[in-house]
Image: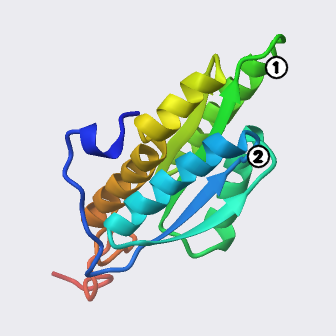
Amino acid sequence: MAGPQSQGLERGRFDDKPARVLIVVAPYYRAVADALLRGAQAEVEAWGATWEVAEVPGALEIAPAIAMAARLGEFHAFVALGCVIRGETTHYDTVVEESAHGVTLLGLQGHCIGNGILTVETEEQARVRAEDQDKGGGAAAAALHLLQLSRRWTRAEKGLGFLQGRLGASQ
């Protein structure tokens, strides 16, 4: 995912209809997580939206936390932030695949979500992506662009396909 300024899409605003964003962050690598979080918060604020932060133990807990918040909370969009750095075992592969799968499933269910879970080989790569490339801001921008689309495509009336006043009426 590109940073917020290089996506090729203009930044929107939510001045007319407020937007609440939940940023779920796994601070396993605290310095990286903090940089991702700063970028996401700044991007959400630039759109005129508000944010709340929830911390979870690790990348595998991000998607379940977002699923709970989507079901129980009053959020319009979600940002997933974390970092997975390859180690000496295959655990890296499991965490990378399953965390990405969880976030993707949430998006396919219609949630406006941006994935800012970094998957890297070294802490230096993570630092560059979190700070210099602003992947946290990019994830927030992605979620907010999806929210814009969702609001554009949402119909004011959502019925069962019947026209009001026409059910049972003879023509």
Residue 9 pos. (x, y %): 21, 46
Which of these two is toward me, 121 or 61? Answer: 121
> Which residue: 40% across, 70% down?
160
Q: Residues within 10 Å of mark 1 (few under 14, many from 20)?
A: few
Which quarter of the rendering shows the N terminus? Answer: top left
Query: Is residue 9 visible to us here?
Result: yes
Q: What residue is shown with label 1?
A: 91
Q: Are marks 1 and 2 in contact (CB under 8 Å)?
A: no
Q: Is residue 111 visible?
A: no
Q: Secondary structure at mark 2?
A: helix
Left or right side of 93 for 118: left
Residue 61 tag number: 2
Residue at the far bottom in the pictured view: 165
- Distance CA(mark 1)–CA(mark 2): 15 Å
Residue at 69% of width from left, 29% of height from top? 84
- The residue tagged with tag 1: helix, strand or loop? helix
Query: Seen from this angle, which residue lies furthest left?
Result: 171
Judging from the image, the colouring scheme is rainbow
